[in-house]
Amino acid sequence: MLKQIKRLLPSKSNSKELLEKLEQTLYQKIGGEKGTLALSNAFYDEMEKNIHLRELLAIHKQPLDGIRIKFFEFLSGWLGGPGLYVEKYGHPQLRARHMPFKVTKKQSSLWMLCMNNALNNTVEDERVKTQMRQAFAKLAVHMVNC
């Protein structure tokens, strides 16, 4: 019986590997800089190509090149990687920065549609995707200001 129980318990090497996976940030889990850049670009690619997201696209300064970079820099720190946005611009103050724009529940939902599609196109691990969706959903709801 004791042997059967020991087999169920993780070995020291498995425990270390499991602990390392648990300690990884989302930034690391999606591939660091490369994965974060891919997510940022997929998000804005989706916004540009999906006709259902035109309303969301309309409130973004064109061309999107600068916004893509800022979003990547924000995501880098927000996902647990280097705080590129904070280093350049200070605290994100996302809600305050978006106050000049009318952010409705509908726009929040459109933003999540865009992010969900971007996650589907860039993140393979379903558990990581779920974790990220939950975090982004909280952020999207927080941004609603009317």
Image (cartoon, grey):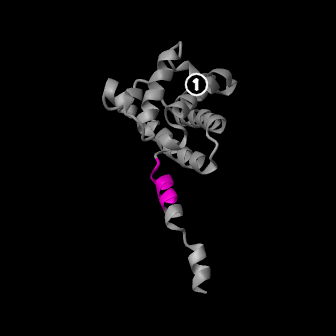
Query: Which of the 4 image quadrants contains residue 54?
Result: top right
Residue beneath the point at 48% across and 59% down: 16
- Quarter containing the N terminus: bottom right
Residue beneath the point at 51% across and 41% down: 136
Question: Horizontal and vertical percent for residue 21?
Answer: 51, 53
With 120 as the anchor, is 75 left or right in this view? left
Q: Evaluate whether residue 99 shows in this view.
A: no
Q: Which residues are magenta?
A: 16-24
Q: Is residue 14 above or below residue 30?
A: below
Q: Evaluate whether residue 109 shows in this view.
A: yes
How many marks can you see?
1
Extreme residue toward the top, this view? 63
Residue beneath the point at 54% across and 31% down: 34
**Residue 26 falls inside the magenta stretch:** no
Residue beneath the point at 61% across and 40% down: 123
With 66 as the anchor, is 4 left or right in this view? right
Main structural element of the magenta stretch: helix, strand or loop?
helix
Q: Residues within 10 Å of mark 1 (few under 14, many from 20)?
A: many
Question: Horizontal and vertical percent for residue 112?
Answer: 58, 37
Question: Horizontal and vertical percent for residue 65?
Answer: 51, 16
Badge 1 amino acid:
Tyr
Q: Is residue 23 above or below residue 120?
A: below
Secondary-structure class at tag 1: helix
Question: Horizontal and vertical percent for residue 60?
Answer: 51, 20
Residue topped by disc 1: 44
Q: Is residue 17 above or below residue 144?
A: below
**Residue 21 falls inside the magenta stretch:** yes
Q: Nearer the viewer, residue 7 or 67?
A: 7
Q: Nearer the viewer, residue 130 or 56?
A: 130
Q: Is residue 97 above or below residue 11?
A: above
Q: Nearer the viewer, residue 51 or 64?
A: 64
